[in-house]
Structures are given as structure tokens and as C-alpha cells.
Amino acid sequence: MTNRYQSVGFAVESAAAVDELLRRAMAEGVVEALLDGGRLVRWHDAPSGARLAVLVRPDGAVRSATPSFRPDTPQVLSARLTGLLPDGADADADAVQLAPRHASYPLAVQFETGGLAINDLPFGDEVDLELVGFAHAMECYPHEDAYRSSGIPLRIREVLPAGLVPLAGAEGPCRSRATALVSGVVLACTPHRNVCGGGEFLHVVIDTEAMVLDAVVCPQSVEGPPVQPGRIVTASMWFVARRSCAVLDPSRPDGANHPPAAPQSVRSAVRRALRSRRSGRPG
């Protein structure tokens, strides 16, 4: 099982290594000044899509840090923002509850830039989000029979919002977490190397209940056969979201904001999944 940083290729295994990573990010990233005198630092490994957002206090101390990922063409989830789930100690770790369109389940997510993003959210409205699931570990099954015989208590395509179930602890119920158990069918799997972070990771596009999801996982954290299109995967995921927006492509003469096209194989797989969902299918 890996930590969130390793899931997207930031090869850190200790608190000291994380501290060193954040120092590098603050020295090399793109800086945006904040009204309170602090700053937002964005560190982006462009070839792989791995990202790191670091919020820095006015005194220079790290306020929070969130790893993330943005593929060339992210999957977009339309969801109504139904509530705020406070962390209690760290506003940047607050979770937001969503009601994904066409889904029967709620979902909790964290935002890439923490409280900065949450302050601008139109709660009660439906928005388009780019959502990434960070799998600390993933199990892969070659076919439906192998999955069903494994005894996993999830349908082939299912999202179980486990992070919204309060767990009793020594100090009472724990806070809600931006996590869920996910099972689904692989539409695409692309290996990446995070040059900035020094590690490798997989970008997996998963067709699950009511959505197509971008997920990332460290290759060493996959159990079973290699992740390939058509295979079934299941994982506990931590979700990071951002508001969906167009990407400025400076190479376009008209300066239009359009995301680059996804590979034809990925576009075809997503279209097939959406057609199958509309027509109905067994789970």
C-alpha cells in the first residue's frame, strides 16, 4: 500500500522525504500571491500530468499540500454540491459532499486547492468537476468469473461511499473522509513517469456506477494480473477534485481554450461505456 504522493509518482516514503519534496515544490513551482499575504504554489510535471498544490502561510510555513493529477483530457463529472463536511482542525482538508448526476449515491471529495476552492463553490448548484481517485492499493481481475468468485461484496460497477459512514473512535465519531470503495471495468491504462517526483504510476480510466473516472495508482500496489482494458478492478480511493475548465493552448493561432483530444482508443472506450449505461446492463 502506498501513500497519496506515491500514487502519482512522487517517490516519498517518510515525513522527512515529504518535507524535502515540498521545499522543492516551493522553490520550483509557479507562485500565486494570496490576499492574506500567503501564496499558492503549483508544481506540475507536464509530461505525466502529476501535480502538487502547496498553500503557504504569510510566515512561510506550509499550510497544506495536496497531490493531484490532470490527464490531457480529463473525465468530467456533473454533480450538485450538497454540503460541507468540516475537518475540524484543517479547513484545507474539509470535504465537500456531492450528488453526482444519475447516481444513487453521494460522494465526498477534497479540492486540489483546499479552502481557496471551497470558498468559491456555489453550494446547492450543479457544477462540472474533474475528479481523480487515488488508489492506495488496487486489485485486478482478468474477467467477470474471477471477480465474482473472489467474494468481494461489490457489484462489477459500484461506488460505496465508505468515507461518509462515521466510525466510532476513542474520542467519538470520526470526521467524514473523501474516500469510497470503487469497482469498475478498465477502459484504458497508461503508464507514466513523474520526472519531478522520480516515481512511476498508472493512469487508469474506469467505467463505474454512474460515471467514468480517472484514477492513479503506483504499479507496485496492484495485486493480480496487469491492469488492461476490459479487466475489472476494485480499490479504496481518496478523491481530489477541481472545477472543470478549458485549457489554454498557446500553439493555437486563434488562442481558443480547448483541451487536447484524447487518444482515439480512449474516446471510443468512453463512448461505448456511455452507450452501455444508457441502454442498461447487469452490474
Image (cartoon, rainbow, N blue to C red):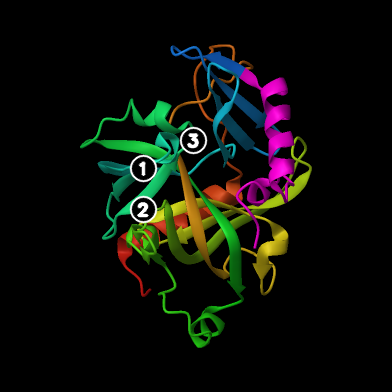
Q: Nearer the viewer, mark 1 or mark 3?
A: 1
Count of numbered badges drawn on the protein: 3
**How far from the left and from the top, in percent, is residue 117?**
40, 29
Packing grade of label 2 (10 A; few <14, some 14-19, many >=20) is: some
Q: Residue at x 62, y 35 (%)?
A: 51
Q: How far, Cα to Cα, is label 3 from label 2?
A: 19 Å
Q: Is residue 28 left or right of residue 176?
A: right
Q: Is residue 46 visible?
A: yes
Q: Which residue is denoted by mark 1 in the rendering?
A: 88
In magenta, the rendered stretch is: 1-30
Q: Position of residue 102 (x, y in %)?
A: 27, 54
Lower sequence index among marks 1 and 2:
1
Point out the tag, 1 or 3, that comes first from the N-terminus: 1
Q: Nearer the viewer, residue 229 or 28?
A: 28
Residue 112: mark: 3
Mark 1 is on which residue type?
Answer: Gly
Query: How far apart in space, not on screen, are marks 1 and 2 (Cα)?
Result: 8 Å
